[in-house]
Image: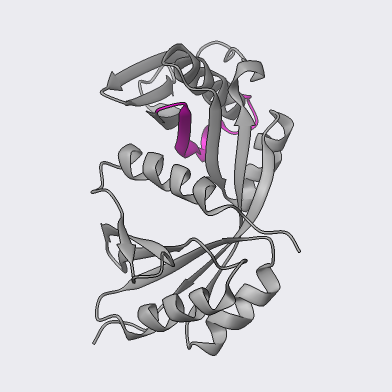
Amino acid sequence: MGKIESELTRRWLDGWTVARALPAAEEVGASGDGLRSACGQPGREVEVFALRADEEPESLARLAATVAAARQSTWLTVPTQHPGAVEAAVRAAGLELVHRAEWLMTADLAGHPVHEAAAPYELEVRTEGPVTVVSFRAPSGEVAARGTVAVVGADAVADRIETHAAHRRRGLGSAVMGSLAEVAVSRGARTGLLIASEEGQRLYSALGWHHAADVVIARGPAAP
């Protein structure tokens, strides 16, 4: 049976916390079951990421029980090659599935395609430390599309890739991803990592990104 390597999840999480200016994730439990990130979002104060769900189902059961008992609003995110088994386990622990068909994806950035945005959009690149934000602005000045990348070692974690509804189907998503890849390569990154929403999976696949695992997300009961 296949499994998702825990190191891949760790690498993605290292970049994701940097991209969002969050504290470094902390270990959950004494068995290396998972990592805990203080997200600080309304309704999502804490997120727990499973590391060994595929190789040791008991580790997932322990994490799910921890999330179910949490007094803060807590989510559980599980990269997995066996989403059906994971969904059954989190339901058994009393967690609520967040119905999103998300994927953990990877890419070799050296061959990433680059697409120019058609006029009249203008590219804006802003870098602060390891994080770069790429934006395309319309003539009105509004941000039509944007994305973030955090470079940590040889990895580049893409995050918050968005195109405003009024500017979709104009190639801006491809242009954002190409610009992020160019920036990442120039800063020494070789591998791209991201978690793709259902809407983004087709775009990323067309750009050469590969499905590494499904991502099952659940949340615990509301905090008392």
The x and y percentages for residue 122 are 44, 12
Q: Vertical placement of 62 versus 216: above or below? A: below
The x and y percentages for residue 11 are 45, 42
The x and y percentages for residue 194 are 53, 41
Quarter occupied by residue 71? bottom left
Q: Is 203 inside the magenta-drawn segment?
A: no
The x and y percentages for residue 82 are 69, 67
Q: Vertical placement of 128 versus 186: above or below? A: below
Quarter of the C terminus within the rendering: bottom left
Q: Going 39% across and 65% down the picture, which residue do you hit? A: 48
Comparing 40 with 186, the one in front is 186
Q: What's drawn in magenta, residue-wise? A: 153-171
Comparing 111 with 115, the one in front is 111
Q: Going 65% across and 31% down the picture, which residue do you hit? A: 169
Q: Going 53% across and 38% down the picture, which residue do you hit? A: 193
Q: Is 158 inside the magenta-drawn segment?
A: yes
